[in-house]
Image: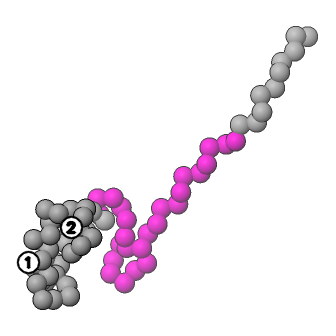
């Protein structure tokens, strides 16, 4: 808990309780985090549409057209 203690000291006790003598968080905590992730993926339109399907990735916006160098106008 050295690294979390440096950046988030107020969370250390809670993490120590959650991970007491185990490699992963309790199932109820895992399910809560999974639900939050599902809500976020729906909200932001990321992730697959169904289990087992490839995830959708939006195409990047096209780059704005490059402006050419300014041209000096002349009076005719």
Which quadrant of the rendered structure holds the C terminus?
top right
Name the spot of residue 10 as percent of width and height, x first.
Answer: 13, 62
Q: What's the magenta region?
A: 42-66
Position of residue 6 measured from the top left corner of the image (x, y, whole percent): 24, 64
Quarter of the rendering occupied by the N terminus: bottom left
Query: Residue 68: horizontal and vertical position, in percent?
Result: 76, 36
Image-based side of 17 in relation to 7, left or right: left
Q: Residue furthest top?
A: 75
Identified at 25% across, 62% down, the residue is 7
Secondary element at tag 2: helix
User: Residue at coordinates 37% horizontally, 73% vertically from top-left?
Assistant: 48
Which residue is the site of mark 2? 5
Res 3 quadrant in image? bottom left
Left/right placement of residue 59 relative to residue 35 reads right
Task: Say whether residue 16 is visible.
Answer: yes
For residue 34, the mark is: none
Q: Is residue 28 magenta?
A: no
Residue 24, percent across and down? 19, 85
Select label 1 or label 2 by which is in front: 2
Residue 14 lies left or right of residue 41; in this view the side is left
Which residue is the site of mark 1?
Answer: 17
């Amino acid at each position: 808990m050295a690294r979390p203690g440096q950046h988030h000291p107020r969370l250390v006790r809670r993490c120590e309780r959650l991970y007491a003598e185990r490699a992963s968080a309790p199932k109820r905590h895992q399910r809560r985090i999974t639900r939050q992730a599902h809500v976020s993926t729906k909200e932001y339109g990321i992730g697959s549409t169904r289990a087992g399907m490839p995830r959708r990735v939006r195409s990047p916006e096209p780059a704005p057209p490059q402006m050419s160098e300014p041209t000096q106008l002349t009076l005719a």
